[in-house]
Image (cartoon, coloured by chain):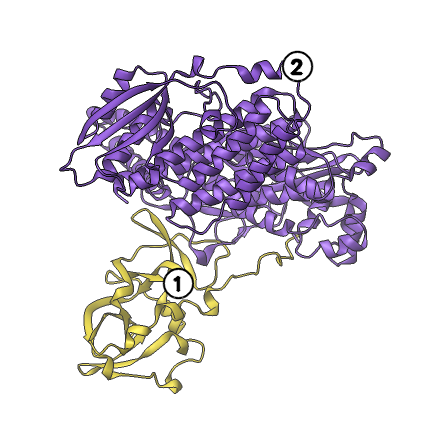
Chain colours: A purple, B yellow
Amino acid sequence: MSDDMTAYRDVFLSESAEYLQAMTEGLLALEAEPNDLEPVETVFRGAHSLKGMAAAMGYTRTQELTHKMESLMDTVRKRVQVADHGLIDLMLRATDTVQTVIDDESGGGDAVDIAPMVAELVARTAGASSAPGPVTHHGAGESARHPSDEDGARYRIRVSIEESCVLKGVRAYMTLKRLSHMGTIIDTTPSAREIEDEQFDRWFEVLFQTTSAPEAVRNAVLAVTEVEDALVERVETAPTAPTVPAETGAAPASPARSVPKLSDTQTVRISISHLDAMVNLVGELVIIRSRLERVARQSGLPDMVDALDALQRVSADLQQEVMQTRMVPVGNIFNRFPRMVRDLARDLGKDVTLITEGLDIELDRTVLDEIGDPIVHLLRNCVDHGIEAPEERQAVGKPTRGTVTLSAEREREQIRITVTDDGRGMDVERIWQAAVARGLADPATRESHSESDILLYVCMPGFSTVDKATRVSGRGVGMDVVKGKIEYLGGSISMRSKRGVGTTVSLVLPLTLAIIQALLIAFGERVYALPLGAVDEVLGLEEVNVTTIDGRWVAELRGGDVVTVQHFDPTEGLSAPGAVAPAAGDHLVLVRSGEETRALIAPSLIGRQEIVIKPLSRLLRGLHGLGGATVLGDGQVALILDPRTLFRTEG
Amino acid sequence: MAEFVSQEARQYVLLRLGAEEYGLPIKRVQSIIRYEEPTPVPRAPSGVEGVVNLRGQVIPLIDLRRLLLGRSIEVTPSSRIVVVDSQTGTVGLAVDTVHEVASIDPASVRPAPVAVLAAETGEAFEGVAQYGDRLVILLDPDKALSGPALGPSQSPGQEDGVDV
């Protein structure tokens, strides 16, 4: 394959994935609202566009399959039959097959047999015509609608390539590609694959539908190097004749709303490794800039200070842009889930709708790639264990259809992802007793455990075996993996549940793993960085009332809240909570960690700074309270305190 | 190591820990920098002195002399940090001095005499080689860095005793 074609293949792959996604969404929408014609159009157009694109690529099996899907959807579109569950199922499975075939064909393979799926689609399409479903009265008028009015005209283009041309296949390919930008390629003679394989003599023919003028089409074709001539001839479109596949293929080529046209996509695909390298380089730039700033301050040269101001602005913008390139809307992965939830619910004989919210919230690609699996897990738990069977729901007066909500929202430098179901909920006391029975919890400490703390016992490895015995259902399965993953990403997990009402699991994750705002604190001669996202307030000792309760040092805040005073030693790490009193001149930094807030003693505050997070070596991973390291302007290393695990030293 | 069968002379960075001379395979040495005071890391494994800044990368520093011989290096102007690639990632090894790069004929390498090596650190050596009139102990960086002193200081989830 030439470079050109490889590039086109990549474009094809990403675009086809978008179309398939749009079709899946359309099918699900149609299932929910079988009389809505809009999703029908979306699916129909998706299949149609895929067919054209596949033809241009010479992916004949994809082309044939999508063609049959298009024909089937056409019967729905014309109200010859209704989109019942069987049809939706078939179309969803066909969508999966298309993906498999695309993977196969784009990899040059020949392994996937589409015949069975094609047969099913044809049978269903034919079944519709022989035994029509409920046809509405205006259905007939709809089917007689002449498509070419709004779709432009149809042309037969005969393209001849110069005799001296060495790369006929490539030129032909470029021609098809160019045409696909202007309209829809309906058919070619010989087939697109044969054309690409140079199995033609001097010329080939394209059946083409477009709204562009014939001269424009001709000029576009002639603009391809080594094209000798192009004959463009208008073809009259026959009135719709459903038995001839090529004719039903005359789809409205009006610009699709939900699926972008090939030429409209103003994006480049770039490998993650390039982005990572850019982020690292920008990180270095930020460090060098702070170093220069120090030098400038010491030297006191006004010109240099000015120049540095400019550098500061430019590098801040650059950094923002680079970070932005890595941000991806959560919709990219959330959109996969409605289908998954639907299939799972059907398998289990349940009726579940998934509502997704906050799809446009953006998250660093590295974070997003990692959270897909944990979310799948949480959703499975909801459908499998949370939502009751329809009869059971009815018996307790709930709507038979269960609802699972997956939402994303932004909170400062973090993102909160919540999975909520309206199912049977979990029994906090039962879980607590099970934890005690397994020796995981000390019965005497019941009072100091929050509801979320107790529910999180289901995240302990193997806890679910206990669940079964106590009929709290297998909600623990795999939750240890979920919790581990979230914590590995520097996030935290919390749970809420009410018996009979439902369960909510919240994941709080950092937006990005690379650059953050931090408060620099000096403990003796050691500087530590504390992510600003977790800092609620910085207080002077005179602003609070420091006292002891039960021998523990606490600070009473102005609002009346009482928080534990926390001492940190740069060599020893965290002291026991409330064990050490603040000294004169210290500040108290209110740090939030999960549900808890403590007043961290800060002997000396250096200030707020943007820092680049450097991961710690594997030798140092897993140390509680440390989230990485950063290099300060003077080249010194500062360790980053991780608020999420900072206070986790208690048994 | 697999390439050990090659009959070609292999190159080693020779360094000194106290009176003894050691060799590290040059292929594994990323760079050699002047010694700098590490930033200590609370509750790090006992073998890790802290972290240092290697051109923007933060790497752990291990005192090789303390790791192998139980006594810390004495910091002098000739102290160096040898940056090596190991299975546990890039690490810095603090040594008393680095003095030359030597080609050592694999044929001259003998197994290290077990009796002279502490059982705990014996694993770390590829063998002993004759170089000129000196004996050089050849180190396997991966094995040298997999000892218990570099394991987790406390296994996660089992911390206790701080609760009041």
Above or below — where is A65 with respect to A399? below
Q: Chain of mark 2?
A: A
Which quadrant is the C terminus of chain A positioned in?
bottom right
Element on which disc 2 rests:
loop
In the image shown, does A130 or A279 lie closer to the viewer? A130
Residue kind at label 1, given as amino acid type: Gln
| Residue B87 disc label | 1
In the image shown, does A177 or A10 lie closer to the viewer? A177
Above or below — where is A615 with respect to B93? above
The structure residue drawn at horizontal position 58% and vertical position 13%, both measured from the top left corner, is A141
Residue kind at label 2, given as amino acid type: His
3D distance between C-alphas at marks 1 and 2:
73 Å
| Residue A432 disc label | none
Residue A606 visible within the image: no
Dot 1, crowdedness within 10 Å: few (<14), some or many (≥20)? Answer: few
Q: Are marks 1 and 2 on the same chain?
A: no
The structure residue drawn at horizontal position 32% and vertical position 44%, both measured from the top left corner, is A635
Residue A149: image location, x then y, percent? 44, 12
The structure residue drawn at horizontal position 62% and vertical position 27%, both measured from the top left corner, is A30
Mark 1 or mark 2, whichever is nearer to me:
2
Hey, which quadrant is residue A424 in on the image? top right
Hey, which quadrant is residue A222 in on the image? top left
Residue A440: image location, x then y, percent? 72, 56
Residue B9 visible within the image: yes
The structure residue drawn at horizontal position 32% and vertical position 65%, both measured from the top left corner, is B74
In the image shown, does A544 or A44 lie closer to the viewer? A44
Above or below — where is A202 with respect to B129? above
In the image shown, does A367 or A98 lie closer to the viewer? A98
Dot 2, crowdedness within 10 Å: few (<14), some or many (≥20)? Answer: few
Residue A612: image location, x then y, percent? 39, 40
Q: Chain of mark 1?
A: B
Q: Which residue is mark 2?
A: A137
